[in-house]
Image: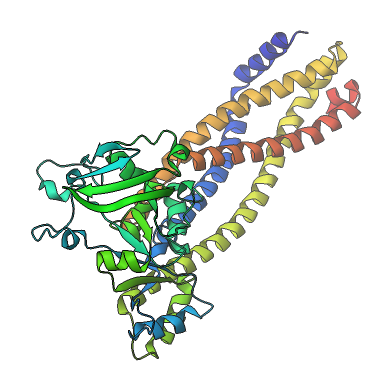
Amino acid sequence: MKFTDCLSVAWYNLTHKKRFYVRLFLNLLFMTVSVMLWLSVLSALSFAHNSYLYGAASDNVMYFNINRSDDHTNDNYDAFCSLNAMDETMRAAASAKVDLPAYLHKDGWSFVNIKYTEAVINEKRFQGENDYSYYFEREYDRRELPSKYSVPLHLAVTATSALWTDNELTEYRFKAGRNTPLLAGTTELAEGQIVISDYILQRFGISTNRLDDLIGEHISIFCEGTTILEDYEITGILDRNLFHVDALNDSPQIFIAESDDVCTQFGITDFSYRLPIDGYENTDTVLRAAEEIQSYGWDYILEYISEYYAFIAHMQTIVRKIGGLFGITILSALSLMFYQAFSRYFSDQRSWYGMLSAVGMERRNLHTIILSELGILLLFVFITAAVTARLLMILISQAMYSLIGTTLTLNAAQTAAILSISLVVLLCLISLVTSLNMWSLRRKPAVELMKS
């Protein structure tokens, strides 16, 4: 028989034994929806917890304002050194934001609007321009004052080799999905070198299609005829999404290295050090150590933040353990239900299978018919289960929002992964049970099957 003939027989069986196949369909549907819903809720809860933990990782930080003089007369320096030596803290980053309005003697300016500046690369001038995109989290509203959407030109002088902390990088990875914000070059800075974001380059109208070509070029920045930076070598270009990180939303996107000449030029005497804490579960330990240092004391805001996120982390651990235990239980129960459902299916097929074998139908054609029936049934089950699980997920999410103010969402990648896992689990169980029963059918002669 041709495959199309076997497919026609399979379809005929499905449509003329409705009660039997509807019962089998409902059993398979319940099992598949259970697996999909379990995976969806577990993934959505994990994503919701991660969005709290990793989406706010940069908030787990202590700030120190430290004088750059050699004798470190500021008491914050001693506090910083003591806490920085703890195992619960990580590598710090330090920078000083240049007061450009003061440097340019613009008493009426609170910041330098980029539209008043220009950049020069290889003797080609690029005028800065506003595009109302600096505030990433909201759309441009013309009813707002223009200054709220102006693109500010900020400049930072860095005192450490690290431009960002590990916690800031963790939050960036979660929000941007990239391992590092470095798009080209390096972040290692020496005197006369500059690291700048692709966003600022584009605000100057500088093409960022081939970022590697900009590495090694020299840039100068002017404001109304006054030189801000002159002949600095571009060594690195940063991803603008780094500045979606909570702690960096309003930070400079241009970095130059500390030196005596630079600090004298811009009047820099202090640097702001950001000391990250390794996990919210360690924040309380660091805060207690800070309390013992008279020059620093207790940070009540950080205490409140850490307690909240430590609770979220604890809840995530509990949910994962319960979800894993529930998953083992549900898969065991569903496996048993699968076996019972298909045992009934093959038990019902025995006499029919034996009759067709007795009249001379080849067993490979019989196997093709049975597998076609199961394939068609599985297709309808999987589509219906995906829609049903999605609707139930929406209802659960609405209930969660009403109870605790948290919604359960899945992105496209998570949805695809859940569908794939559900399909693999379904196919594995069906293949295992089908193989066992088909092997049993092949062993028995047609006469014996017709009597069963």
Residue in the picture at 58% in, 28% down:
22
Picture quarter containing residue 87?
Answer: bottom right
Across and down, in percent, residue 395 comes to: 38, 46
Examine the rendered structure and indicate whether residue 123 appears above or below residue 272: above
Residue at 40% x, 84% y is 79
Q: Residue at x 49, y 47 (%)?
A: 185
Q: Quadrant of residue 1?
A: top right
Is there any visible trace of residue 136 in the rendered image? Answer: no
Model colouring: rainbow
Residue 271 position in % (x across, y down): 33, 71
Where 349 sits versus 31, above or below?
above
Q: Is residue 312 left or right of residue 353?
A: left
The residue lying toward the viewer, choosing from 63 and 101, is 101
Question: Measuring 57% from the left and 45% from the top, which residue is drawn there?
Answer: 35
* Residue 408 spot, x, y in % from top left: 41, 50
Which quarter of the figure has residue 215?
Answer: top left
State the image coordinates of residue 444 (x, y, percent, origin top left).
Answer: 90, 28
- In the depicted structure, whether residue 49 falls above or below residue 390: below
